[in-house]
Image (cartoon, grey):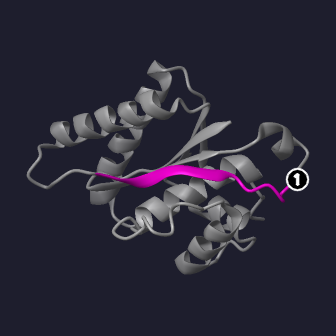
Amino acid sequence: MIILGVDPGVALMGYAIIKTNVSKHLRQDRNEKPKVIDFGCITTTKFDSPGDRLNIIHKEIGKLIDKHKPDLISIESLFFFKNLKTAMPVSQAKGVILLAAAQKKIPVMEFTPLQVKMTVVGYGRAEKKQVQEMTKQLLDMDGFDHKTKGRKKDDAADALGIALCAVLGVRDPN
């Protein structure tokens, strides 16, 4: 199974492509790690109009879907927000991702930040660094050690954790 994990954003959107052996997953064998195929960020600039930014995101997500042919898209949901000014554009970006998934008939799973922390680390109040470190331990990152320079943005790391949620299954934060 190929999973596209997405950490939605407008200026910077993290993505990750991982591959897992479904039969191993169904038997809960965690000895075989999911393999990282690709990860990185889709970027837009403040000089792009809001419509152009969404168009760029839609096109780039479409390219990732066409290239990797994911069986599932795993995306972070907006559980709460501190700033309505940033929540609205992020929601719009998430909307174009959902549109791209619907156009290609790819199922989508959504996970809150709390669910990601619980699933990856086992603790809902885990720090970002803890999530990133555990994500690295849970994934087969062979071949990426020498390529990660300039790609270690938090958004890409978050997308890896979001993709992992679809593999490991969500743990109830309560």
Q: What residue sits 70% from the left and 64% below the top?
A: 138
Q: Is residue 42 visible?
A: yes
Residue that carries the numbered disc 1 in the rendered image: 29
Query: Is residue 149 covered in magenta?
Result: no
Q: What residue sits 44% from the left and 32% below the top?
A: 67
Q: Is residue 112 visible?
A: no
Q: What residue sits 49% from the left and 53% below the top?
A: 78
Q: Is residue 112 above or below residue 74?
A: below
Residue 50 in picture, x, y percent from top left? 17, 43
Image quarter in which the N terminus is found: top right
Image quarter in which the C terminus is found: bottom right
Along the viewing direction, whichever of 150 and 107 lies nearer the viewer: 150
Count of marks placed on residues: 1
Q: Residue furthest right?
A: 27
Q: What residue sits 37% from the left and 71% below the top?
A: 149
Along the viewing direction, whichever of 171 and 38 lies nearer the viewer: 38
User: Which picture quadrant has residue 87?
Assistant: bottom left
Residue 140 in picture, x, y percent from top left? 65, 60
Along the viewing direction, whichever of 82 and 137 lies nearer the viewer: 137
In the displayed structure image, the side of residue 12 where residue 123 appears, left or right = right
Along the viewing direction, whichever of 111 and 149 lies nearer the viewer: 149
User: Which stretch appears magenta?
Assistant: 30-42
Query: Is residue 33 covered in magenta?
Result: yes
Specify the amino acid type for callout 1.
Asp
Q: Is residue 57 above or below residue 62?
A: below
Residue 109 in picture, x, y percent from top left? 62, 40
User: Which picture quadrant has residue 155?
Assistant: bottom left
